[in-house]
């Protein structure tokens, strides 16, 4: 074996290992690593694979509950949804590759998250994507948005899994570092979940799917460093996706999973064959021997290093039960996919890779995993921000402000994006994109899932603890607003460079907020992903902890949406309004100010109000429901009016609150309800101790304020629909 | 009534159409793998939507040469009804069972949304569930649905009553803005000469359930059943 005499600390540094980490690798091996081994250490100990900066904090999140079958640590989280069914889901980022090559970066992001879900034995049934781009004025934004949306659609549409929801925001902090977070949700039988721990020394290790090429080598390491000015030069580290092969791989894997052949299965994602074999051996406390000559390759002359580190897409590694090989091979041949026995499980506890009868890597797996570096990085809390006094803001026409808000990049209709995604394939989409949460039916009896992604980065920046809690609360509220019982979340933690104390402070604060909210709402974290070093030339993104929420609706017929349904119905506001304007969109879009703290989060009120709203929806009293969030009350009313193409006549505004705060404040834990039975709803609210207020009546074709005039719903809709297509059509 | 749905590698709306067929015929369709060389006894062959063979080369181009297509062509020539939806329509044109071709949408983008269709000829097994001229609301989901053919073929389709559906406004009016993919003469679906083969881009199978936002596709399948039973 190559003795590694040519591998120096300087070379290790080029591979992203610090001096200390390199020394640790030498100690663990008892000698210097050779180049192939150095590559393996470098990816396995990269931030992306090892979570070395985030691990100690992630451990503090609540991850259990009676509904949880499998929490973080596997390919995806698994939650019990009754009747022997389970929902399997995870969110994952593909930020760095999507900035370098938007179409392929986003496409392979979707491919990777699909594999995480069907690896567990689940059929993928929905995709959501949470996107953040730089300022619309930045020269790259249009190109990136166009490429990312085409990439997500190109992949998801072809594999035939509906893309049913997500979000899209713009902020200059993402100019050099966009965020592409893809979430996949799948369905499985609760007693047929597949895990990654290898077992049974002597069992065969089998490679299936696409061939291995030279693409994506060291993608995980690339994703663990900040960008300088040379991001474009990293294009060769981006993988290329083939959704057709993925579709075949889904069908072949699910068909094999019906048999009793698979002991363990793991997709080859970041760090490819290296991380999948280490993961399987490590979890099983065993070793794996690989014969790299047997790996199906796309081109000749690939080195062991390249084969171990390639991130070619649409590949899986499996450990098969003895005697199952022929049955498994037959299924993969039917689907015209490669199937190769490339190794076996051993008792040695070592990862041994050989090629042309020469051992090219020999690493003890246990220590590679357990001795991975863990950092307790210094961190600093941001200074608290002073409150905004609404009295100091100029007096403005509320209708004009509303028009400006619904036509802004933040609040405009994102139809241009979701009409490019097949959101109907599989024939189960009950509530399409554009509402609080998407709803997909999952059984012939009408059981359904509600799905949403949420995050308000401007809140997280001003106060990470509140921001983290708010992201969870809004997710919980969005699921509640369609009538669902929120079950659990997956989180995608997107932050800057953790080596900077202020960034680490954001991370620590956000985790604290997420923890508090998840505990208070009984809404555990079952899977997730951390993406750090989202910085370009020292400028970090806003802290963006995206929360992907999943909820259950026992009967899809009781799901509601935000569209106003019936003239004469009453519009009722649930929750307390204090007129909080700090960090509001009103302040940002109208007053060009990003001052103040985010709204306070009262988790007890959040739970009480949400439980009340869900109960009213189930009681059949609610025709439409919408959570009040970005933009405040008047924007929420307008969104309901536009969705239903019906007008609303508002009652007199309260006198004890400044008008601007009442109409545009972003106080939390609030919902708008349309009901034909206002008396019953109000009485029930009072009995439950829930703040309630009549806002207006559904009528006509205009939104009418008592003392500020009116605007037609069609004019509002035209404004709301105009910005994004107009922006994208500019050459 | 017995139905058979052909599954190609990359088909992805076979579940949707099987659900719609099962609802209308009260029995599950036979699923036929593309590598088969013969079909079971059936009253209708369906080529579903999706991305057969990844739509590599051209949409439907490789699928048109799949082993099962010899038998599909033979049965179609004998007069057995064949329905191609979306990718199935593309495959039928590539296989020469229907004239013309489907180019990328005018926007060059995939489009998924509800559209309105005008029923141009209801005197066929596929459309007898509708009134002539009726406007129906059905979703589309495609990237390459821009129907094109030479003017002589288009005239022949028009004169022969072989245009099945056209993109239209909510009341059946023909307006340029409703022809979202740029199809020649706003054509959304066509018949062969004997009106026993239909290809259409929209997805009637995705409009058969009130819980999913529309039922205008039901009459399509119910009409087929009443005509073929």
Image (spheres, helix red, strand yellow):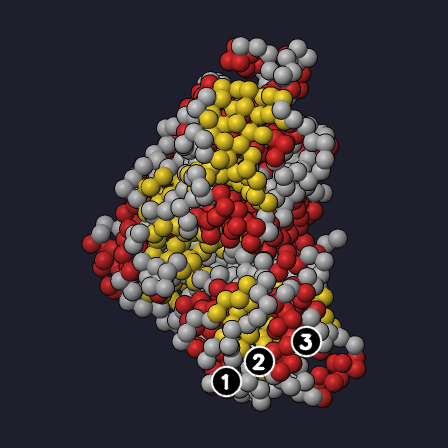
Q: Secondary structure at mark 3?
A: loop
Mark 2 neighbour class, 10 Å CA radius: few under 14, some 14 to 19, many 20 or more = many
Q: Is residue B164 left or right of residue A162?
A: right
Query: Residue A459, relative to residue A504: is it above or below?
Result: below
Query: Residue A721, relative to residue A13: is it above or below?
Result: below
Among the two numbered marks 3 and 1 on one chain, the one whose residue lies closer to the N terminus: 3
> Where on the picture, by quarter, is residue B86?
bottom right
Q: Secondary structure at mark 2?
A: loop
The residue wearing badge 3 is: B97
The residue wearing badge 1 is: B228
Distance from Cα at disc 3 to Cα at disc 1: 21 Å
Question: Which chain hosts label 3?
Answer: B
For image coordinates 24% across by 63% down, the residue present is A680
The residue wearing badge 2 is: B81
Query: Residue B228, relative to residue B47: is it above or below?
Result: below
Question: Which chain hosts label 1?
Answer: B
- Out of B95 and A190, give the one closest to the viewer: B95
For image coordinates 26% across by 59% down, the residue present is A682
- Out of B194 and A626, give the one closest to the viewer: B194
Q: Is residue A148 visible?
A: no
Among the two numbered marks 1 and 2 on one chain, the one whose residue lies closer to the N terminus: 2
For image coordinates 38% across by 28% down, the residue present is A59
What is the x, y in percent for residue B41? 51, 77
């Amino acid at each position: 074996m190559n003795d590694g005499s040519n591998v120096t600390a300087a070379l290790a540094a080029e591979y992203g290992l610090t001096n200390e980490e390199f020394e640790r690798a030498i100690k663990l091996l008892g000698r210097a690593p050779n180049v192939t081994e150095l590559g393996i250490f470098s990816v396995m100990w990269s931030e992306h694979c090892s979570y070395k900066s985030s691990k100690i904090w992630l451990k503090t999140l609540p991850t259990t509950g009676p509904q949880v079958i499998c929490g973080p640590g596997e390919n995806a989280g698994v939650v019990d949804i009754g009747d022997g069914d389970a929902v399997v889901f995870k969110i994952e980022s593909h930020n760095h590759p999507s900035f370098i090559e938007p179409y392929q970066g986003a496409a392979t992001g979707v491919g990777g998250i699909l594999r995480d879900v069907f690896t567990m034995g689940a059929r993928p049934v929905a995709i959501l994507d949470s996107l953040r781009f730089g300022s619309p004025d930045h020269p790259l934004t249009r190109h990136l948005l166009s490429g990312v949306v085409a990439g997500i659609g190109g992949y998801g549409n072809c594999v035939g899994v509906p893309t049913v929801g997500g979000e899209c925001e713009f902020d200059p902090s993402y100019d050099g570092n966009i965020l592409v977070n893809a979430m996949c949700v799948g369905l499985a039988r609760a007693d047929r979940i597949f895990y990654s721990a290898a077992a049974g020394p002597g069992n065969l290790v089998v490679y299936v799917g696409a061939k291995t090429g030279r693409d994506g080598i060291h993608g995980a390491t690339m994703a663990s460093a900040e960008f300088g000015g040379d991001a474009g030069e990293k294009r060769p580290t981006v993988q290329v996706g083939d959704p057709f092969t993925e579709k075949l791989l889904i069908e072949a894997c699910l068909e094999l999973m019906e048999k009793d052949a698979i002991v363990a299965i793991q997709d080859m994602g970041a760090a490819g064959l290296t991380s999948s074999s280490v993961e399987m051996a490590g979890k099983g406390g065993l070793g794996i021997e690989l014969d790299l000559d047997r790996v199906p390759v796309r081109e000749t002359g690939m080195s062991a290093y390249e084969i171990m580190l390639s991130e070619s897409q649409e590949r899986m590694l499996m450990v098969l039960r003895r005697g199952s090989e022929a049955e498994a091979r037959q299924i993969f041949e039917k689907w015209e996919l490669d199937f190769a026995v490339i190794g076996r499980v051993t008792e040695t506890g070592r990862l041994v890779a050989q090629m042309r009868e020469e051992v090219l890597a020999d690493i003890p797996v246990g220590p590679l995993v357990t001795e991975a570096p863990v950092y307790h990085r210094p961190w600093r809390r941001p200074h608290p921000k002073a409150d905004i006094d609404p009295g100091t803001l100029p007096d403005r026409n509320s209708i004009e402000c509303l028009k400006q808000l619904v036509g802004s990049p933040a609040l405009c209709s994102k139809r241009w994006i979701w009409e490019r995604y097949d959101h109907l394939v599989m024939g189960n989409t009950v509530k399409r994109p554009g509402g609080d949460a998407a709803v997909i039916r999952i059984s012939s009896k009408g059981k359904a899932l509600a799905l949403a992604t949420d995050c308000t980065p401007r809140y997280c920046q001003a106060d990470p603890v509140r921001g983290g809690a708010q992201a969870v609360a809004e997710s919980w509220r969005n699921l509640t607003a369609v009538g669902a019982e929120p079950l659990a979340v997956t989180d995608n933690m997107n932050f800057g460079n953790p080596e900077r104390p202020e960034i680490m402070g954001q991370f620590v604060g956000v985790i604290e907020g997420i923890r508090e909210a998840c505990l208070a709402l009984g809404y555990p974290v079952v899977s997730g992903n951390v993406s750090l070093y989202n910085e370009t030339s020292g400028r970090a993104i806003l802290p963006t902890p995206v929360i992907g929420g999943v909820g259950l609706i026992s009967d899809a017929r009781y799901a509601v949406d935000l569209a106003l349904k019936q003239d004469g119905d009453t519009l009722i506001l649930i929750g307390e309004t204090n007129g909080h304007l700090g960090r509001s969109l009103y302040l940002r879009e109208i007053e060009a100010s990003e001052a103040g703290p985010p709204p306070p989060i009262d988790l007890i009120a959040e739970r009480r109000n949400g439980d009340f709203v869900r109960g009213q929806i189930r009681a059949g009293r609610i025709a439409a429901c919408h959570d009040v969030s970005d933009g405040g009350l008047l924007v929420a009313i307008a969104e309901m009016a536009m969705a239903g193409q019906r007008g609303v006549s508002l009652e007199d505004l309260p006198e004890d609150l400044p008008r601007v705060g009442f109409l545009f404040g972003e106080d939390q834990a609030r919902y708008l309800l349309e009901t034909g039975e206002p008396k019953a709803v109000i009485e029930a609210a009072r009995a439950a101790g829930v703040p309630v207020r009549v806002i207006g009546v559904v009528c006509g074709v205009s939104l009418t304020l008592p003392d500020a005039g009116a605007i037609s719903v069609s004019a509002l809709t035209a404004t709301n629909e105009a910005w994004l297509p107009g922006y994208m059509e500019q050459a | 009534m017995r139905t058979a749905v052909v599954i190609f590698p990359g088909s992805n709306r076979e579940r949707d159409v099987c659900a719609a067929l099962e609802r209308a015929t009260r029995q599950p369709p036979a699923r036929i793998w593309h590598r088969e060389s013969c079909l079971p006894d059936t009253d209708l062959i369906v080529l579903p939507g999706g991305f057969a063979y990844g739509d590599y080369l051209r949409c439907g181009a490789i699928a048109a040469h799949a082993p099962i297509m010899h038998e599909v062509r033979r049965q179609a020539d004998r007069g057995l009804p064949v329905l191609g939806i979306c990718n199935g329509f593309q495959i039928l044109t590539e296989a020469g069972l229907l004239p013309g071709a489907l180019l990328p949408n005018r926007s060059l983008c995939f489009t998924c949304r509800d559209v309105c269709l005008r029923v141009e000829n209801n005197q066929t097994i596929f459309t007898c569930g509708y009134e002539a001229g009726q406007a129906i609301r059905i979703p589309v989901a495609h990237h390459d649905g821009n129907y094109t053919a030479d003017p002589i073929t288009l005239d022949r389709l028009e004169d022969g009553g072989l245009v099945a559906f056209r993109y239209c406004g909510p009341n059946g009016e023909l307006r340029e803005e409703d022809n979202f993919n740029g199809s020649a003469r706003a054509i959304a679906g066509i018949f062969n000469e004997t009106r026993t083969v239909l290809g259409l881009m929209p997805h009637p199978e995705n409009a058969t359930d009130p819980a999913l936002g529309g039922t205008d596709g039901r009459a399509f399948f119910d009409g087929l059943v009443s005509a073929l039973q």
